[in-house]
Amino acid sequence: MAGASFIGTELRNAEMDESDCRNANFQGASLILAFIRGSNLQNTDLTSAKLIGAYLSGTDLSYADLTNADVSNAVFRGAKLFGANMTCIRLEESYLDGALYDATTVWPQDFNPLEYGAIKM
């Protein structure tokens, strides 16, 4: 699935654990309650995607773009967020404990990821 286009696709409850989706385009896709644990989503376009309640534990989201993605109740535990654009909707309602990020990760203004359990590397 690397490099594939899923623009606007309905993927509710999809089981995509340990998938290679790097460079894929999920712009505007519905990934509500999807299982995407341990997957490679490097450089993935997730702008305006619906990730409500999605399971992204251990997923590599390095350099992914989550601008305006709805991440309410999404689970990012242990995810790699290096260089990711995390200017998401309802980010404060997601689970970031143990998620790894660096100085190049972009967060919403006034959002402190450390308060939500993320770890700066």
Image (tube, helix red, strand yellow):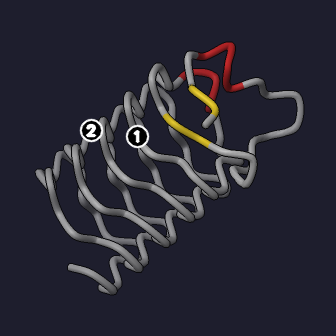
User: Which disc, if any, is residue 79?
Assistant: 1
Q: On screen, 119 above or below 105?
A: above
Q: Quadrant of the C terminus?
A: top right
Residue 56 occupies quadrant: top left
Q: In the picture provided, is 13 more to the left or to the right than 5?
A: left
Q: Residue at x 45, y 55 (%)?
A: 61
Whole-angstrom CA distance, mark 2 to mark 1, is 17 Å
Q: Residues within 10 Å of mark 1 (few under 14, many from 20)?
A: many
Q: Earlier in the sequence, mark 2 or mark 1?
A: 2
Q: Which residue is mark 2?
A: 33
Residue type at tag 2: Leu
Residue 37 visible to an observer of this rendering: yes
Label 2 vs label 1, nearer the camera = 1
Q: Quadrant of the N terminus?
A: bottom left
Residue 34 occupies quadrant: top left
Residue type at tag 1: Ala
Q: Residue at x 45, y 24 (%)?
A: 98
Q: Secondary structure at mark 1?
A: loop
